[in-house]
Image (tube, grey):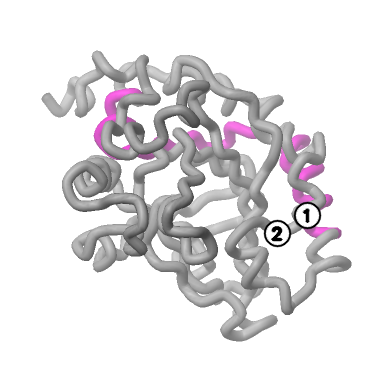
Amino acid sequence: MPLTDDEKAAFKRDGVLIRRGLVAPNLTRRAISLIDTWYRECLDPEGIPAYSQRTFAPELGNHPDVLALYSKTEAATLACDLLGETSPVSTTQIQIRVPESELPGAQPEKAMHVDGVSCPHLDPQELRTFSLLIGVVLSDINDPQGGALRYLPGGHRTMAQWFSDQWSLGITEQVPPEIDRQDGVSFLGAPGDVLLMHHLVPHTVGRNFAPFPRVMAYFRVSHPEHSRRRLEALRDPWLDYPPLLSVPSYPASQE
């Protein structure tokens, strides 16, 4: 089902949209099986810091059954509803939060950030930005203490202002102090639920105190022009979102 006008307005206001059960169980089961096998047989505990910065199960990043979570579902259509047109997506970021009971302290809480800007593992002059983050839930996430992603609704507008007025390439701070102090809203869900989040929405993730791994598959989606205007897109949150330019910032019922 295409995005409604109210959903587009809510996304413009919050920078976040959630569609429950968007990915069919037969697709999630195949991806879950692949990732679970990798976790049991191939996980290198010493590699967890590197996995956490980039991706777990890197050899599965372009596996057809994992890419299908995006390419064979309505998620790709919703991305086009927001961006108008999209560049091809050829890889998946798999993010796992390992239970503290298995490897205590292996994954400390991440700082509030936006992806690809002033990352600790990147040169501060380097940008690896995109337009839209799509996250597919692949494990039950029913407790904020279970390694849930936490995001700041509306933070995309604050970040765009900061990038316009105070930030420049080379600065190592990822977010302004008022954003860094925020806890954010926990994203809870079940396998097949999908999160669509504006790239500029600041977010973090905590340690996993649940007894099982928290698993998400992320797809970084870009407008075809994004790579040629990364700095401009940091300062103008709707540059990559032409279909939303005429949409009000709040659902009609709240006007």
Q: Give the left or right position of residue 132, taking residue 33 as reference.
A: left
Say which element carries label 1.
helix
Q: Please provide the residue range marked out in magenta.
A: 8-37
Residue farthest to the right, as pictured:
41
Asked whether the residues under the numbered discs 1 and 2 touch, taking CB atoms below 8 Å apart as contact, a structural biologist would say yes
Residue 132 rendering spot, x and y as whole percentages: 47, 35
> Quarter holding the C terminus?
top left
Q: Give the left or right position of residue 170, taking residue 20 as reference.
A: left
Residue 254 visible to an observer of this rendering: yes
Looking at the rendering, which quadrant does residue 139 occupy? bottom right
Residue 68 rendering spot, x and y as whole percentages: 73, 32
Q: Nearer the viewer, residue 173 or 85?
A: 173
Looking at the rendering, which quadrant does residue 9 occupy? top left
- The structure residue drawn at horizontal position 26% and vertical position 63%, both measured from the top left corner, is 182
Q: Is residue 176 magenta?
A: no
Question: Amino acid under label 1?
Answer: Ile
Residue 119 rendering spot, x and y as whole percentages: 46, 60
Q: Give the left or right position of residue 137, taking residue 127 as reference.
A: right
Q: Which mark is residue 35?
A: 1
Q: Which mark is residue 56?
A: 2
